[in-house]
Structures are given as structure tokens and as C-alpha cells.
Image: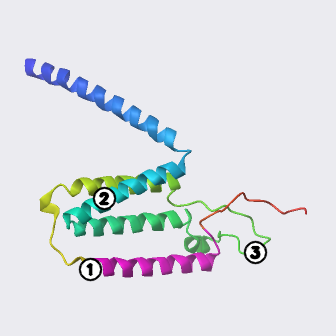
Amino acid sequence: MEGQGTDSASEAPLATWRNDFSKMFQYYLDRSTPHPLQRWLGTLAVAMIYILRVYYVQGFYVISYGLGIYVLNLLIGFLSPKEDPELEVLDGASLPMKGSDEFKPFIRRLPEFRFWYSITKAFIVAFLLTFFSMLDVPVFWPILLCYWGVLFVLTMKRQILHMIKYKYVPFTVGKQVSYIGY
């Protein structure tokens, strides 16, 4: 019974530290939200550190391939609408196709902040994995690079055709101006 009391006493500082760290981490995440350029520059710096690490070690190509597949998956989520028009056609509701149809704004399946956060976490985890030599599987990396390139081209082709078919653009440039009434 006495041993149980000492375990809970030793867990309390760890739980307190974890809670404090979690609050501090969330505070800085919240503060970074309105600064997308700085966030993406930080992610670019993390990605460059990872690339330099892989180049310096001359290994971990399977980890890099997995990272590339994961980033491609995130990119598809970022470019896709939250509600897929192909599924809505079956329900009768779809994106507006004519000027008389109701306007529906483009809402991403994966919002920009979650996209950024997931990519940054992925690069950090991949970087940490490069310190474990058992994960350095010897492979012929040009094959992986070619295969990833083919996957990227085919996936982007399918996504672009989907955008053209349902007439949506996942990007907005500049301020949106309404010309109704002019």
C-alpha cells in the first residue's frame, strides 16, 4: 500500500509538467495562426534540415518515400472540397454550375492550418527517425523516386480533372469583389 502512494506522488510532477507543456505549446500554436507566411517559412526550414540530414547520411530513403506519400495524401486533402460533388450528385445537391445556382464557398477537406501542422509534424518525426540506424533500409533510391513521381503525376491529374469537371478552384488570390448591381 505504501508503494502505491509513492507512485502517485511521483506521477503528479510529471502530469503537472505535461499539462504545463501542453498549455504552453497550444499558446504558441494559437499565436502562430494569423502568420501563415512565417509558419510556412519555419516548415521550409525544418524540411531543409531534414533534406540535409538525409543527404549527409546518404540513407533513410524508405523514410523519405513514406514522408513523400504522406505529404501527397495531405495535399490531396488540402485541394479537395469538404463535400465531394461526386457524392452530392447522387443526393441532388452539388456545386453551383450556372449563374442562377446558389453560391457555395469552397471549403477544404483539410484546412490550411491543419495541413501546415501535419506537414511540420511529419518532417520532425521523419528527422527523428533518421537517428535510428535500424530504419536505414538499403534500397535503390532512384526506383522509389520514379515511383513517387508517377504517383504524384497520376494523383494530380485525377485531382485537376476533378476540379475541371466540377468547376472549383481551391485557391483564392486577392480580395473577392462582388459585381452584382453594377
Magenta-drawn segment: 143-169
Between marks 1 and 2, how big is the CA–CA gap?
19 Å
Q: CA distance from mark 3 to mark 1?
A: 47 Å
- Residue 37 is situated, as x and y percent measured from the top left of the image, at 53, 52
Q: Quadrant of residue 94?
A: bottom right
Tell me the element at label 3.
loop
Q: Which residue is labeled 3 in the image?
A: 98
Please tell me in which quadrant of the rendered image residue 20 appears.
top left
Mark 2: which amino acid?
Tyr
Q: Earlier in the sequence, mark 3 or mark 2?
A: 2
Vertical comparison of 114 with 70: above or below:
above
Quadrant of the rendered image containing residue 34: top right
Residue for point 30% across, 32% down? 18
- Location of residue 12 in the rendering, given as x and y in whole percent from the top left corner: 24, 24
> Which of 65/49 is in front?
49
Magenta stretch contains residue 182 = no
Q: Earlier in the sequence, mark 1 or mark 2?
A: 2
Task: State the CA–CA distance, disc 3 to disc 2.
Answer: 47 Å
Q: In front here: 58 or 116?
A: 58
Callout 2 environment at 10 Å: few (<14), some (14 to 19), or many (20+)? many
